């Protein structure tokens, strides 16, 4: 397994499950400092679109709040015999379009505010892509690099057990996210199946997506998010008459998403000239080979001594002149402090929330194009939907079918965002929100509010 390196932490509270309703921030809250919380940043983006489209005030109240916020504090007996406590989260934002859907991340910075923001983004993302899912997100607050494979399995299974029936194949479907992968999903699947009645087990395989192929996973799911990023960049290049051959790009974060986007772009003739991960960055203006970089980081987990390029620090990396910058790491990388450093034509947001509102405003003022996260990185949840469908229908699609349907979905979403941006004379992030919120508003208008 490949995990990011972070400081080790674990929870310390007693065993228990805390279910909170209506985690919210008033729709009038408009943070104007770079110290705003991640969820406040989400609400700022939400409010801008809601104001412009004149979203119904009642629906606005509903969508500015989460449905459920689950906090689980659980003990795990480690392989060495000791007991450790962990804190896990699952936030379910909205399910008006279908079951809650969203990834699980293992990271020491996971907290309720972050998960609340990520769950909200998932709601917009699914609505924008036109798939019948709502938004959710979750994770455990700890550093997985400090644990053996056996202990990671124990922690994962105990978390799945603690969540219990707060997840389900027709209710809330987890998937991989930061520091989790197909193996983690397989453990969650097996644990969940042990908790359901035997007669229902074969009808519950779709409780998670992003599974190994032999356990019901879909071809193309491993590269889906990166593939979706590439489809979006290709649409932008076509729209701006920029040939993909020779297009230069940089990637921040070289995990699953960043590495796949890099590999696929290089295969099309683009040139990767700089990469950054948690250990630092490397740059080679003649071009880097993504496979070599990935092999090196997988073996040594650091770019510091990569011989294929020149080591660069964070500032040097961000100041690298290129056509496209792909942030594929964690949130809030492009801020009021860093946005002026970028020397690119396009920011393709492969990560969730890499640009805060202050950084966003600077990029727009500088004329740098942005493919917003809820559009750019939606490929993962789209193919997760395909996996979910295959499991329900007991089908297995060929990779070519998955790729073709993903491309059609991403292109349709891209075109709709472009058109709405023109209709409202606004930026594409706001347009993406308007597309998503329009679909959600229509559902609530047609169904009404009970009672």
Image (cartoon, helix red, strand yellow):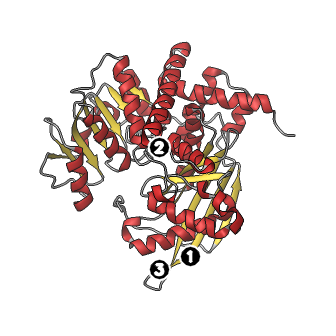
| SS at badge 3 | loop
Is residue 403 at all visible to an observer of this figure?
Answer: yes
Q: Position of residue 401 (x, y in %)?
A: 47, 37
Q: How crowded is the residue under tag 1: few (<14 C-alpha within 10 Å), some, or many (20+)?
A: many
Above or below for 38 versus 159: above
| SS at badge 1 | strand
Label 2 with label 1: CB-CB less than 8 Å: no
Q: Position of residue 271 (x, y in %)?
A: 21, 33
**How far apart in space, not on screen, are marks 2 and 1 (Cα)?**
33 Å
N-terminal of the pair, mark 2 or mark 1, is: 2
The residue positioned farthest toward the right in the image shown = 451
Q: Nearer the viewer, mark 2 or mark 3?
A: 3
Q: Read off the residue under disc 1.
A: 75
Q: Nearer the viewer, mark 2 or mark 1?
A: 1
Q: Nearer the viewer, residue 251 or 172?
A: 172
Q: Read off the residue under disc 2.
A: 35
Q: Nearer the viewer, residue 329 or 240?
A: 240
- State the mark number for residue 78: 3
Residue depicted at x 38% and y 17% = 239
| SS at badge 2 | loop
Please identify the quarter of the rendering in which residue 438 is found.
top right
Residue depicted at x 12% and y 51% = 307
Q: Nearer the viewer, residue 347 or 1?
A: 1
Q: How crowded is the residue under tag 2: few (<14 C-alpha within 10 Å), some, or many (20+)?
A: few
Is 69 positioned to the left or the right of 282 in the image? Answer: right
Q: Nearer the viewer, residue 47 or 262?
A: 262
Please identify the quarter of the rendering in which residue 58 is found.
top right
Is residue 349 at all visible to an observer of this figure?
Answer: no
Residue depicted at x 77% and y 28% = 445
Residue depicted at x 59% and y 32% = 130
């Amino acid at each position: 397994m490949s995990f990011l390196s972070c400081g080790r932490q674990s929870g310390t509270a007693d065993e228990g499950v805390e279910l909170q309703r209506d985690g919210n921030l008033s729709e009038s809250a408009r943070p104007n400092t770079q110290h705003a919380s991640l969820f406040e940043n989400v609400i700022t983006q939400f409010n801008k679109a809601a104001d412009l489209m004149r979203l119904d005030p009642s629906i606005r109240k509903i969508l500015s709040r989460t449905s459920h916020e689950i906090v689980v504090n659980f003990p795990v007996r480690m392989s060495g015999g000791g007991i450790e406590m962990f804190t896990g989260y699952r936030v379910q934002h909205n399910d008006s379009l279908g079951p809650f859907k969203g990834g699980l991340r293992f990271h020491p910075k996971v907290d309720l505010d972050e998960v609340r923001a990520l769950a909200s983004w998932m709601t917009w993302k699914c609505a924008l892509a036109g798939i019948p899912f709502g938004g959710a997100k979750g994770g455990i607050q700890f550093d997985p690099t400090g644990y053996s494979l056996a202990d990671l399995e124990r922690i994962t299974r105990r978390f799945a057990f603690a969540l219990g029936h707060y997840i389900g194949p027709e209710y809330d479907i987890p998937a991989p996210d930061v520091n989790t992968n197909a193996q983690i999903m397989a453990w969650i699947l097996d644990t969940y199946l042990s908790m359901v009645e035997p007669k229902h087990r074969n009808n519950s395989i779709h409780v998670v997506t992003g599974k190994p192929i032999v356990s019901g996973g879909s071809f193309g799911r491993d590269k889906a998010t990166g593939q979706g990023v590439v489809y979006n960049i290709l649409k932008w290049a076509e729209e701006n008459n920029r040939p993909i051959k020779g297009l230069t790009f940089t990637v921040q974060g070289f995990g699953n998403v960043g590495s796949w986007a890099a590999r696929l772009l290089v295969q099309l003739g683009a040139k990767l000239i700089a990469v950054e991960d948690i250990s630092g960055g490397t740059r080679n203006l003649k071009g880097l080979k993504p496979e070599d970089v990935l092999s090196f980081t997988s073996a040594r987990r650091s770019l510091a001594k990569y011989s294929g390029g020149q080591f660069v620090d964070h500032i040097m990396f961000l100041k690298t002149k290129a056509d496209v910058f792909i942030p594929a790491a964690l949130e809030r990388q492009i801020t009021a402090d860093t946005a002026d450093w970028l020397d690119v034509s396009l920011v393709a947001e492969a990560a969730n929330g890499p640009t805060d509102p202050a950084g966003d405003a600077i990029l727009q003022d500088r004329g740098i194009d942005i493919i917003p996260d809820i559009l750019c990185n939606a490929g993962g949840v789209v193919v997760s939907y395909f996996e979910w469908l295959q499991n329900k229908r007991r089908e297995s699609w060929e990779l070519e079918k998955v790729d073709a349907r993903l491309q059609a979905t991403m292109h349709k979403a891209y075109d709709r965002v472009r058109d709405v941006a023109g209709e409202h004379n606004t930026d594409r992030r706001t347009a993406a929100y308007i597309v998503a919120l329009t679909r959600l508003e229509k559902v609530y208008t047609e169904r009404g509010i009970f009672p």
